[in-house]
Amino acid sequence: MNKIVIILLLLFLIVIIFQYKKNNELEYKIKQQEQEIEASSKYIRNLTERLKKKKTEEESVISKAEKLRNLLDSYLAEQKRDENISEEELKENLQKIEREKRFIPNMIPVKGEFTISQRFHIKHKALDFAAPLGTEVAAAAAGEILSVKEDKYFGNVIVMDHFNGYETTYAHLAKILVESGDFIKKGLTIGLVGDTGNSTAPHLHFEIKLNKENIDPEKMVILK
Protein backbone atom coordinates (compact mmCIF):
# COMPACT_ATOMS: atom_id res chain seq x y z
CA MET A 1 0.00 0.00 0.00
CA ASN A 2 2.83 2.37 0.92
CA LYS A 3 4.54 1.62 -2.39
CA ILE A 4 1.37 2.47 -4.30
CA VAL A 5 1.05 5.79 -2.45
CA ILE A 6 4.70 6.62 -3.14
CA ILE A 7 4.30 5.77 -6.83
CA LEU A 8 1.17 7.91 -7.08
CA LEU A 9 2.93 10.79 -5.36
CA LEU A 10 5.88 10.49 -7.74
CA LEU A 11 3.57 10.45 -10.74
CA PHE A 12 1.73 13.48 -9.39
CA LEU A 13 5.06 15.27 -8.87
CA ILE A 14 6.19 14.43 -12.41
CA VAL A 15 2.93 15.83 -13.81
CA ILE A 16 3.37 19.05 -11.81
CA ILE A 17 7.00 19.46 -12.98
CA PHE A 18 6.00 18.76 -16.59
CA GLN A 19 3.15 21.27 -16.42
CA TYR A 20 5.44 23.87 -14.80
CA LYS A 21 7.97 23.44 -17.59
CA LYS A 22 5.25 23.75 -20.22
CA ASN A 23 3.91 26.90 -18.59
CA ASN A 24 7.40 28.45 -18.56
CA GLU A 25 7.88 27.62 -22.22
CA LEU A 26 4.48 29.10 -23.04
CA GLU A 27 5.23 32.29 -21.08
CA TYR A 28 8.56 32.64 -22.93
CA LYS A 29 6.83 32.23 -26.31
CA ILE A 30 4.17 34.76 -25.39
CA LYS A 31 6.84 37.24 -24.28
CA GLN A 32 8.68 36.78 -27.59
CA GLN A 33 5.50 37.29 -29.59
CA GLU A 34 4.62 40.44 -27.63
CA GLN A 35 8.12 41.81 -28.28
CA GLU A 36 7.88 40.99 -31.96
CA ILE A 37 4.49 42.70 -32.31
CA GLU A 38 5.60 45.83 -30.43
CA ALA A 39 8.92 46.05 -32.28
CA SER A 40 7.29 45.45 -35.66
CA SER A 41 4.66 48.13 -35.02
CA LYS A 42 7.37 50.65 -34.15
CA TYR A 43 9.36 49.65 -37.25
CA ILE A 44 6.33 50.15 -39.51
CA ARG A 45 5.63 53.58 -37.95
CA ASN A 46 9.25 54.62 -38.50
CA LEU A 47 9.15 53.45 -42.13
CA THR A 48 5.96 55.41 -42.72
CA GLU A 49 7.50 58.57 -41.26
CA ARG A 50 10.64 58.14 -43.38
CA LEU A 51 8.58 57.72 -46.54
CA LYS A 52 6.77 60.97 -45.79
CA LYS A 53 10.09 62.80 -45.37
CA LYS A 54 11.81 61.14 -48.32
CA LYS A 55 10.65 63.61 -50.97
CA THR A 56 11.83 66.64 -48.96
CA GLU A 57 15.17 65.01 -48.19
CA GLU A 58 15.74 64.09 -51.83
CA GLU A 59 15.25 67.70 -52.80
CA SER A 60 17.63 69.06 -50.19
CA VAL A 61 20.43 66.47 -50.04
CA ILE A 62 23.12 65.98 -52.68
CA SER A 63 22.52 62.73 -54.54
CA LYS A 64 24.72 59.70 -53.90
CA ALA A 65 26.07 59.86 -57.44
CA GLU A 66 27.07 63.50 -57.01
CA LYS A 67 28.77 62.74 -53.69
CA LEU A 68 30.73 59.96 -55.38
CA ARG A 69 31.76 62.28 -58.21
CA ASN A 70 32.93 64.91 -55.70
CA LEU A 71 34.89 62.27 -53.80
CA LEU A 72 36.47 60.98 -56.99
CA ASP A 73 37.44 64.47 -58.20
CA SER A 74 38.98 65.28 -54.82
CA TYR A 75 40.90 62.00 -54.74
CA LEU A 76 42.18 62.40 -58.29
CA ALA A 77 43.33 65.96 -57.69
CA GLU A 78 45.18 65.01 -54.50
CA GLN A 79 46.91 61.96 -55.97
CA LYS A 80 47.94 63.68 -59.20
CA ARG A 81 49.89 66.25 -57.23
CA ASP A 82 52.03 63.56 -55.60
CA GLU A 83 52.29 60.68 -58.06
CA ASN A 84 52.90 60.10 -61.74
CA ILE A 85 49.82 57.92 -62.25
CA SER A 86 47.11 57.87 -64.90
CA GLU A 87 43.54 58.91 -64.20
CA GLU A 88 42.28 55.41 -65.04
CA GLU A 89 44.64 53.84 -62.49
CA LEU A 90 43.52 56.33 -59.86
CA LYS A 91 39.88 55.53 -60.54
CA GLU A 92 40.58 51.80 -60.23
CA ASN A 93 42.40 52.37 -56.94
CA LEU A 94 39.54 54.41 -55.51
CA GLN A 95 36.94 51.88 -56.63
CA LYS A 96 38.97 49.08 -55.03
CA ILE A 97 39.18 51.00 -51.76
CA GLU A 98 35.43 51.66 -51.80
CA ARG A 99 34.68 47.99 -52.52
CA GLU A 100 36.90 46.80 -49.68
CA LYS A 101 35.33 49.28 -47.22
CA ARG A 102 31.89 47.82 -47.89
CA PHE A 103 32.96 44.50 -46.37
CA ILE A 104 34.72 45.92 -43.28
CA PRO A 105 32.38 45.78 -40.21
CA ASN A 106 33.05 49.29 -38.94
CA MET A 107 29.51 50.71 -39.00
CA ILE A 108 27.48 51.28 -35.82
CA PRO A 109 24.95 48.42 -35.91
CA VAL A 110 21.97 50.33 -34.47
CA LYS A 111 20.02 53.10 -36.18
CA GLY A 112 19.07 55.59 -33.52
CA GLU A 113 19.95 56.53 -29.97
CA PHE A 114 21.89 54.06 -27.85
CA THR A 115 24.20 53.72 -24.88
CA ILE A 116 26.93 51.17 -24.36
CA SER A 117 25.66 48.96 -21.54
CA GLN A 118 28.55 46.49 -21.52
CA ARG A 119 31.95 46.53 -23.17
CA PHE A 120 34.25 43.79 -24.45
CA HIS A 121 36.13 41.74 -21.87
CA ILE A 122 37.37 38.19 -21.33
CA LYS A 123 33.96 36.90 -20.18
CA HIS A 124 31.90 39.06 -22.53
CA LYS A 125 33.39 39.02 -26.02
CA ALA A 126 30.99 41.56 -27.45
CA LEU A 127 29.76 45.14 -27.29
CA ASP A 128 26.23 45.69 -25.96
CA PHE A 129 24.16 48.57 -27.38
CA ALA A 130 21.25 49.43 -25.07
CA ALA A 131 18.45 50.88 -27.21
CA PRO A 132 14.64 51.08 -27.15
CA LEU A 133 12.68 47.98 -28.14
CA GLY A 134 12.18 47.93 -31.91
CA THR A 135 15.23 50.06 -32.78
CA GLU A 136 16.52 49.01 -36.19
CA VAL A 137 19.64 46.83 -36.29
CA ALA A 138 21.90 47.42 -39.30
CA ALA A 139 24.44 45.18 -41.00
CA ALA A 140 27.84 46.54 -39.97
CA ALA A 141 29.22 45.52 -43.38
CA ALA A 142 28.07 43.92 -46.60
CA GLY A 143 27.95 40.15 -46.63
CA GLU A 144 25.90 36.96 -46.55
CA ILE A 145 23.55 35.84 -43.80
CA LEU A 146 25.19 32.66 -42.52
CA SER A 147 22.42 31.74 -40.10
CA VAL A 148 19.33 32.94 -38.29
CA LYS A 149 18.46 31.02 -35.17
CA GLU A 150 16.82 31.01 -31.77
CA ASP A 151 19.18 30.43 -28.85
CA LYS A 152 18.23 29.82 -25.21
CA TYR A 153 20.81 32.36 -23.98
CA PHE A 154 21.11 34.82 -26.90
CA GLY A 155 17.49 34.74 -28.06
CA ASN A 156 16.97 35.55 -31.75
CA VAL A 157 20.37 35.64 -33.46
CA ILE A 158 21.79 36.62 -36.87
CA VAL A 159 25.29 35.64 -37.99
CA MET A 160 26.88 37.26 -41.07
CA ASP A 161 29.93 36.37 -43.16
CA HIS A 162 31.77 39.29 -44.84
CA PHE A 163 33.99 37.22 -47.19
CA ASN A 164 37.28 38.54 -45.79
CA GLY A 165 37.75 36.65 -42.53
CA TYR A 166 35.27 38.85 -40.67
CA GLU A 167 32.02 37.55 -39.16
CA THR A 168 29.47 39.53 -37.14
CA THR A 169 26.79 38.35 -34.73
CA TYR A 170 23.63 40.24 -33.70
CA ALA A 171 21.76 38.80 -30.70
CA HIS A 172 18.71 39.30 -28.40
CA LEU A 173 16.65 40.52 -31.37
CA ALA A 174 12.91 41.06 -31.06
CA LYS A 175 12.47 40.25 -34.75
CA ILE A 176 14.66 38.99 -37.58
CA LEU A 177 14.02 40.59 -41.01
CA VAL A 178 16.37 38.45 -43.15
CA GLU A 179 16.83 34.80 -44.02
CA SER A 180 19.84 32.51 -44.17
CA GLY A 181 21.60 32.87 -47.54
CA ASP A 182 20.53 36.48 -48.14
CA PHE A 183 23.19 38.85 -49.51
CA ILE A 184 23.00 42.11 -47.58
CA LYS A 185 24.32 45.60 -48.27
CA LYS A 186 26.19 47.52 -45.59
CA GLY A 187 23.75 49.50 -43.45
CA LEU A 188 20.65 47.52 -44.43
CA THR A 189 18.19 46.85 -41.61
CA ILE A 190 18.37 43.15 -40.71
CA GLY A 191 16.49 43.00 -37.40
CA LEU A 192 14.95 44.87 -34.48
CA VAL A 193 16.38 45.35 -30.97
CA GLY A 194 14.76 43.19 -28.30
CA ASP A 195 15.52 41.36 -25.07
CA THR A 196 14.90 37.76 -26.08
CA GLY A 197 16.90 34.99 -24.47
CA ASN A 198 18.75 35.63 -21.22
CA SER A 199 18.37 39.40 -21.15
CA THR A 200 17.13 41.93 -18.60
CA ALA A 201 16.45 44.88 -20.93
CA PRO A 202 16.31 45.64 -24.67
CA HIS A 203 19.79 45.73 -26.19
CA LEU A 204 21.87 44.47 -29.10
CA HIS A 205 24.67 42.02 -28.30
CA PHE A 206 27.18 42.65 -31.13
CA GLU A 207 30.21 40.46 -31.83
CA ILE A 208 32.97 40.69 -34.43
CA LYS A 209 35.19 37.73 -35.27
CA LEU A 210 38.32 37.83 -37.42
CA ASN A 211 39.44 34.42 -38.63
CA LYS A 212 37.15 32.79 -36.01
CA GLU A 213 38.64 34.78 -33.11
CA ASN A 214 36.58 37.39 -31.25
CA ILE A 215 37.97 40.92 -31.37
CA ASP A 216 36.88 44.06 -29.53
CA PRO A 217 34.23 45.78 -31.72
CA GLU A 218 35.41 49.18 -30.43
CA LYS A 219 38.64 48.62 -32.38
CA MET A 220 36.54 48.55 -35.55
CA VAL A 221 33.44 50.66 -34.95
CA ILE A 222 33.78 54.42 -34.52
CA LEU A 223 31.24 55.32 -31.82
CA LYS A 224 29.57 58.71 -31.80
Image: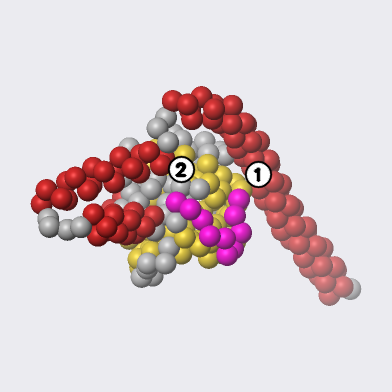
Q: Position of residue 91 (x, y in %)?
A: 28, 55
- Tag 2 secondary structure: strand
Instruction: Using the rendered view, name the quadrant where residue 115 is placed.
Output: top left
In the picture provided, is 96 more to the left or to the right than 177?
left
> What label does residue 163 carry, if any?
none
Front-lying residue, 157 or 96: 96
Please provide the residue range marked out in magenta. 177-186
Front-lying residue, 38 or 87: 87
* Residue that label 1 marks: 36
Which residue is at 60% across, 51% downward? Answer: 176
> What label does residue 110 carry, if any?
2
Front-lying residue, 144 or 204: 144
Quadrant (top left, top right, bottom left, bottom right) of the N terminus? bottom right
Magenta stretch: dominant secondary structure: loop
Whether residue 97 appears in this view of the structure is no
Q: Disc count in the image?
A: 2
- Tag 1 secondary structure: helix
Which residue is at 45% across, 51% downward? Answer: 186
Label 1: few (<14), some or many (≥20) within 10 Å?
many
Front-lying residue, 2 or 28: 28
Disc 2 marks a residue whose amino acid type is Val
Disc 1 marks a residue whose amino acid type is Glu
In the picture provided, is 9 more to the left or to the right than 121?
right
Q: Position of residue 120 (x, y in %)?
A: 34, 53
* Numbered disc in front, either 1 or 2: 2
Mark 1 vs 2, N-terminal side: 1
Q: By what rule are the colours in the image chosen?
A: secondary structure
